[in-house]
Amino acid sequence: MKIKNPLDMHLHLRDEAMLKLVAPFSAKDFRAGVIMPNLIPPLTNLEQLRAYKERITSLCENANFTPLMTLFFKDYEAKFLELARAEIFAIKLYPAGITTNSANGVANFDLKNLASTLNAMSELEIPLLVHGETNDFVMDREAKFAPIYEALAQNFPRLKIVMEHITTKTLCDLLEKYENLYATITLHHLLLTLDDVVGGKMQPHLFCKPIAKRYEDKQALCKLAFSGYEKAMFGSDSAPHSKNDKECCGCAAGIFSAPVALSVLAELFSKHSNEANLQKFISDNACAIHKLEFSKEKIITLKEEKWQVPQNYGEVVPFMAGSELKFKVSAT
Ligand code: NCD
Ligand code: ZN
């Protein structure tokens, strides 16, 4: 199986030692990644953003990997955004306190407060990426955010809005209702329901935000991904935390899937779909939606060859640790 220019449209690379550990996995397998800005402190200015981009690229030098940078959403002046436009791919909005390192996110979704930044973004064609969850009951958080997505889509019709890591049928259905709504889907949400996380012994390495939902939600996500549906893009949400931060009282949310993402997707699509739809899900849809072009191509070959996922990469436990996978990335 061959894939051209695989893209990870939602990726956490962290910083410092963790960045050094995890960046090579994404750089090896993907042509580009949309890099999340939830560092401490969050990325909100161009000096920080340039320095972070430099730290990433210096680790991926021979890999033909482009980090597509994002800023952390806050009230930005139009002048600043005009300057930033050439250096950023998008702006990522987090509700305050909803997930890892989101304390500085948006606390009030009264659109009047957000309008000046969102209007400037519309004008400058800067996409808005949204972590859509409210503070409601944990299984309902994403669906309860749907009215906010609707209000955003209606009030800012020229703004490209990406509903990140969708996990519910509710949001799958919303894609059909608004032209300017798009979505990313993770690998783990194509595989897991809440049962896998807490139905038996509690599995900290499957704990993430948004939490995996019901079987019918997973089915709705699979239907979009496996059909190559043009508004759905792959975004791994690969989000590494140290083993200590996962296997403790107060487990951090996040699943580290970068090292296995392509192998597992190849297996899933060979079983439930086909190579052409994988190509759409993992690259073509995102290229069409965001008008992305890459001068230097990256072709990834996936061979049918069994391998076992290691129990850990350094201090991080990967998604599906210990499992046997059927496809292996063989050459780039
Ligand atoms: C992410 C992280 O660890 O940064 N965690 C997660 O569970 N997905 C943040 C996020 O994308 O919500
Ligand atoms: Zn994320």
Image (spheres, rainbow, N blue to C red):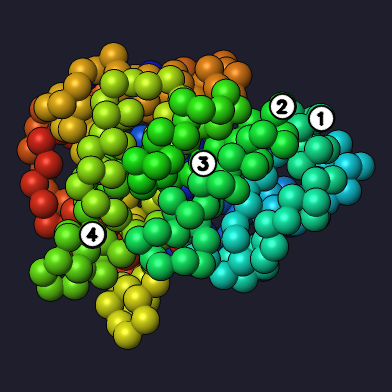
Q: Quadrant of the N terminus?
A: top left
Query: Quick one: label 4 or label 3, which is nearer the N terminus?
Result: 3
Kind of element beneath mark 1: helix
Query: How much space separates mark 1 and mark 3, taking CA atoms?
Result: 20 Å
Percent across and percent down for residue 102 are 58, 66
Residue of label 3? 163
Query: Quick one: label 1 or label 3, which is nearer the N terminus?
Result: 1
Outermost residue on the bottom side: it is 249
Residue of label 1? 123
Residue of label 2? 158
Percent across and percent down for residue 97 are 57, 70
Q: Residues within 10 Å of mark 2 (few under 14, many from 20)?
A: some
**Which residue is located at x 88 percent, y 42 percent?**
78
Q: Amino acid at mark 3?
A: Met
For ligand 1, the image quadrant comes to bottom left
In the image, which is nearer the foreground, mark 2 or mark 1? 2
Residue of label 4? 194
Query: Quick one: label 2 or label 1, which is nearer the N terminus?
Result: 1
For residue 248, above or below residue 127: below
